Image (spheres, rainbow, N blue to C red):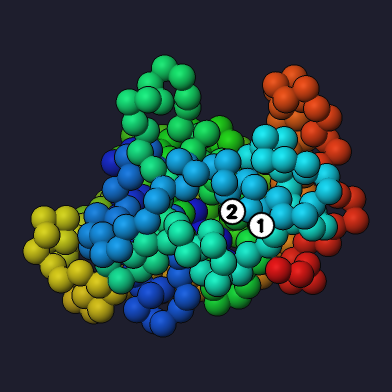
Amino acid sequence: MRVAFVGKGGSGKTTLSALFSRHLARSGAPVLAIDGDINQHLAEALGGVEESAPPLGAHLPEIKDFLRGDNPRIPSAEAMIKTTPPGRGSRLLRPLGDDELHARHVGRAGGVPLMVTGEFDESDLGVACYHSKLGAVELYLGHLLDGPGEYVVVDMTAGADAFASGLFTRFDMTFLVAEPTRKGVSVYRQYRDHAEQFGIRIAVVGNKVTGEDDLLFLKEQVGDDLLTHLEQSPWVRAAEQGRTAPGPDALASLEPHNRHALGVLREAVDSHPRDWDRLHRHAVELHLRNVRAWADARTGEDLAGQVDPEYVPGPAAPA
């Protein structure tokens, strides 16, 4: 199951991404965390890097070449764009599988397997946008055969910028983290309106709640979309200051209410079975949008032909 954490900058989405990943790892569930935020703070929030791995964004051509496999509709990595959907002959992946992409790009932080997109460095200034790096994550999720009880948790870019690429359609559940302030809920309506167009499930997670007034404010602002909330946490502050032990087991000392909230998040994810047809339909639609908007003109090819009408998404597709 694929889970995204989004929200305004400073809302605590990276903290929640880390807490949820550690919560899943502590239960013994297979989980992969992915840092898709330009600030790249997820490793630190998880408890610090234990094993580093090359960033995905710096190796996009190699990732494309690996994923296209023997798909006859994709003659080269250069002809493959970030929205290119898989087809017959594409190389499909199992979560944390025994393949060269996972072997190369999965590190470890705080006891949790971690992929990173990489920082926006000096060579990118003025010539690239961060979504060029996120293209690797979009392709990875598009070629992933994950199932119930397997989790991929992505810390997304802040604000409505998360909708600037087709990546937002790749998830089973999107958690919008909101503080109990007007600024904290300011992006909620933007997310809701964009998500409704694609049938994307969004649930609001209140964060840094200090009392009934905060909770009432969130309920007034987002209504039934408020799934649960986390209280202001001394444990989180201590972790951010390096005063708690790393690793998923350290979560045992997290405040009881906040541990319960993480369980509510997992229940929300597990209660919605994967709709493979919807995921693939959105992937094809977003690909054709990009083809018409810029990709055909840039590559000089008809990239609509990359869509394989006979491809069957989901477990029936051979990995």
**Residue, x 54% and y 62% (percent of image)?**
100
Left or right of 53 on screen, residue 200: right
Which residue occupies the foreground of this view, 283 or 183? Answer: 283
Regarding residue 218, the answer to whether it shows in the image is no
Label 2: element kind: helix
User: Taking 312 as reference, is 267 above or below it?
Assistant: below
Left or right of 178 on screen, residue 270: right
User: Taking 239 as reference, is 181 above or below it?
Assistant: above
The residue beneath circle 1 is 143
Q: What is the distance, in whole Å, between disc 2 and disc 1 at their CAs? A: 5 Å
The residue beneath circle 2 is 140
What amino acid is at disc 1? Answer: His
User: Taking 178 as reference, is 1 above or below it?
Assistant: below
Q: Position of residue 205 (x, y in %)?
A: 41, 55
CB under 8 Å between callouts 2 and 1?
Answer: yes
Which residue occupies the foreground of this view, 40 or 68? Answer: 68
Q: Position of residue 210 (x, y in %)?
A: 21, 55
Regarding residue 240, the answer to whether it shows in the image is yes
What amino acid is at disc 2? Answer: Tyr
Label 1: element kind: loop
Q: Position of residue 35 (x, y in %)?
A: 40, 50
